[in-house]
Image (tube, grey):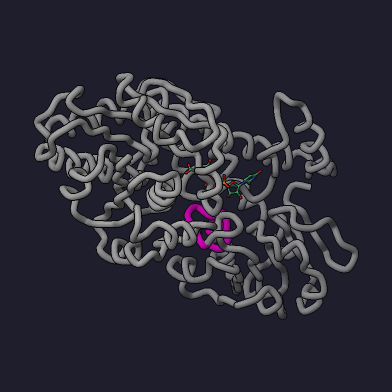
Amino acid sequence: MKISVIGTGYVGTVSAACFAELGHEVICVDIEPLKIDMLNRGVPPIYEDGLSELLEKHVGKNLSATSDYDFAINNSEVSFICVGTPSNQDGKIDLAIVKAASASIGKSLRKKKGYHVIVVKSTVVPETTEKGVLPIIENQSGKKLGEFGIAMNPEFLREGKAVHDFMHPDKIVVGSLDKRSGDIVASLYSGINCEVTRTNPRTAEMIKYVNNAFLATKISFSNEVGNICKELGIDTYEVMKAVGKDFRIGPHFLNSGAGFGGSCFPKDVKALIGKAHDVGYEPTLLRSVMAVNEIQPLRMITLLKNKLPDLKGKKIAVLGLAFKNDTDDIRESRSIPVIKELIEEGAQVCAYDKMAIESMKRIFPDIEYCNSAIDVLRGSDACLIMTEWGEFKSLDKEFNVMKNRLVIDGRHMQSPRKDVDYVGLCW
Ligand code: UGA
């Protein structure tokens, strides 16, 4: 089929490349000329494993990019809205970009003959597709639902593994108001071996939020258990490994540590809290999930100060800045509140991350950055491990260059050691 994908962030670009791989003809649309130019040269605007190979294979054949909405809508049968949905000041979802994209699609649809399906893939709170996107498209196009179709098709892609997750999903959810548009969207995935769950749009929107909120809950739950275990001298990893053997619980996402970050979990849990509040429900559990996640990174500082009560002038090495390994993304990274606190305590902060230094320089331009773990450890009074980068598992002799061999590990990278004062955050 012919598909247009609006927005070339990680969801849009990955979806476009993967739909092209499935044999569809895909046009990417973005208002940023730089991104259009990069895509048309086969250069990914973001880093995702396997993405550049797909672009190389399909750009110039069945994948292209433009900033011309009229061209894209006219030359496609289905349009996916994949634009960003940031949080506003009070944590609620900001739908301005989704609405602007909907208006642009609607305007182009006015000039188009024939049926067209608009699919919301951006993560939006329940009712947005029906009460936000649909009326804008009707208004701008001068057409009524039925003359065009509308659907909601959430994504469950992990950053860094998005191409793999798109091609090997555990679920595909298609929410539509009518059978015709739902059938068209479901058919786009016929090359993938996965059952399609069909719902209405608001249920599809809710499934996405509940998915992320549940995973975030598992992490905060594990962190709370880890904090209790720490006080009792119990290894929480041993506990959760056994607990995860219960098929009703499962072994994944039970790793306690410095908390969850990223562009999705914090934002989506807050947006669900905001929506619940709007409809008159007080989401006590979800608020606690966020509260544990705020406290968790600061426990790193508490453990550090138990050993080094006065941080003034002390050189503290921060290992890991990204919100998780294998990405340069620092959004909501748990290293941010930790560095802030270290600066407030008067520490001299020195940081290393394999990919995220440039991103972090925008938030903390004045701290010191090093290009390797050994450089950051050299002469330091203590080290905090904030991100689960694989290379931190094998750090060994590198600790010898520290002035004081004290390590607070927020990601369970190593077991306690004899040669280093090695303190686990939750174990
Ligand atoms: C998350 C979801 O996993 C995806 O399914 C979803 O599509 C995506 O959000 C989204 O809404 O777009 P992502 O943000 O890439 O994906 O990150 P995850 O790999 O899920 O990790 C999130 C955070 O949880 C990281 O900071 C990680 O360090 C932390 N984490 C993860 C833990 O602290 N413990 C765990 O056991 C697992």
Is 333 magenta? The answer is yes
Q: Position of residue 103 (x, y in %)?
A: 17, 40
What residue lies at 77% left-to-right and 79% top-to-bottom?
A: 401
**In-front residue for pair 142/203:** 142
Displayed-image quarter of ligand 1: top right
- In the image, residue 213 sits, relative to residue 308, either above or below, namely above
Q: How many marks?
A: 0
Q: Where are the magenta residues, as a range? A: 328-339
Q: Position of residue 46 (x, y in %)?
A: 43, 60
Q: Position of residue 189 (x, y in %)?
A: 44, 35
Is 100 magenta? The answer is no
What residue lies at 18% left-to-right and 44% top-to-bottom?
A: 74
The image quadrant of residue 277 is: top left
Left or right relative to 16: residue 335: right
Work out whether residue 204 can be spotted. yes
- In the image, residue 421 sits, relative to residue 268, either above or below, namely below
**In-front residue for pair 313/69:** 69
**In-front residue for pair 173/183:** 183
What residue lies at 72% left-to-right and 57% top-to-bottom?
A: 409
Q: Position of residue 18 (x, y in %)?
A: 44, 48
Work out whether residue 92 can be spotted. no
What residue lies at 66% left-to-right and 40% top-to-bottom?
A: 253
**Quadrant where the N terminus lies?**
top left
Left or right relative to 45: residue 301: right
Q: As drawn, which residue projects farthest toward the right?
A: 418
Left or right relative to 279: residue 149: left
- In the image, residue 146 sits, relative to residue 158, either above or below, namely above
